[in-house]
Amino acid sequence: MSIVIAGIHTNIGKTICSAVVCQALGYDYWKPVQAGDLENSDSIFIKRVVSNPSCIIHPEAYRLSIPASPHYAAEVDGVTITKANIKLPISDNNIVIETAGGIMSPLAYNYINIDLIEQLSLPVILVSNSYLGSINHTLLSIAVLKQRKIRLKGIVFSGESNPSTESFIKQYTGLPILFSIPALAEVNATSIDNFVKQVSIKI
C-alpha cells in the first residue's frame, strides 16, 4: 500500500525517511508541493540517493520559488494551491508521498497538510526527532491525526537518538517504532543502501 510520510515539524528527516523506504522497498516517490531550492529539491535528492531501480520519481504538483510555508510561497509566485490540483500519480507501484512541513502546516489559507493526508486516504508514517519539545510536537501530531481518524502505521525516529524520549513516546502512544535512522555522517546512495542492508524495514 502507498504511504504518506509526514513530520512533527519541518526539517525533521522526512526526506531521508522517504529515501530509506524507497531504497528498501522499491516504492515510487512523490512530493506534491516543493517550496524553494528547486535546483536541489527533495525529488532531486531522492533521485541522487536512491539506487533501487524500481523507484520512479513523480513530478510535483506545485514547484514554488521561495523556501517558505507553501501558502506564502504560492502567494509570492501568484498561484493558489488547490485540493483539486493535487492528485495521486497513476502508478503500478506503491508510492511514498512526502508532505511539506508539519501535520498542520498550511498549503493554502483553507487547506493544510492534514487535509491533504485525509484527501489521499492513505496511512501515515510519522517522523519524529529528539530535540527539546519534540515529545509535545509528536503527541500533538498524533492526537490530531487520530481526531481525523487517519490511520497511523507507526513512528520513525530520525537523527541523534534519545532513548528516554523515544521510550516515553512509544509507551504513551502505544504506536510501534518502525525503525530509527541515525544521524548519518554522510547522506549519499552508499550510506542509504548500507543502512537499509543493516535494518529490517517493514511498514
Image: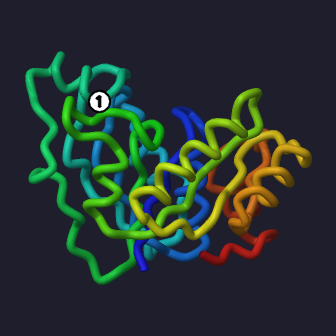
Q: Is residue 87 left or right of residue 66?
A: left
Q: Secondary structure at mark 1?
A: helix
* Front residue (pair 8, 28): 8
> Furthest-right residue in view?
164
Please determine whether, in this image, residue 161 is positioned above or below residue 170.
above
Residue at 52% over, 33% down? 10
Q: Is residue 30 left or right of residue 197?
A: left
Residue 15 seen in render: no
Q: Which residue lies under the disc numbered 1? A: 70
In which image quadrant can residue 173 be found?
bottom right
> Furthest-top residue in view?
76
For badge 1, the amino acid type reads: Pro
Please determine whether, in this image, residue 138 is positioned above or below residue 200.
above
- Please identify the quadrant where the N terminus is shown: bottom left
* Front residue (pair 1, 132): 132
Return the x and y of residue 26 as percentages of the image width and height.
50, 75
Return the x and y of residue 189 as percentages of the image width and height.
62, 55
Residue at 29% over, 83% down? 92
Residue 28 seen in render: yes
- Please identify the quadrant where the C terminus is shown: bottom right
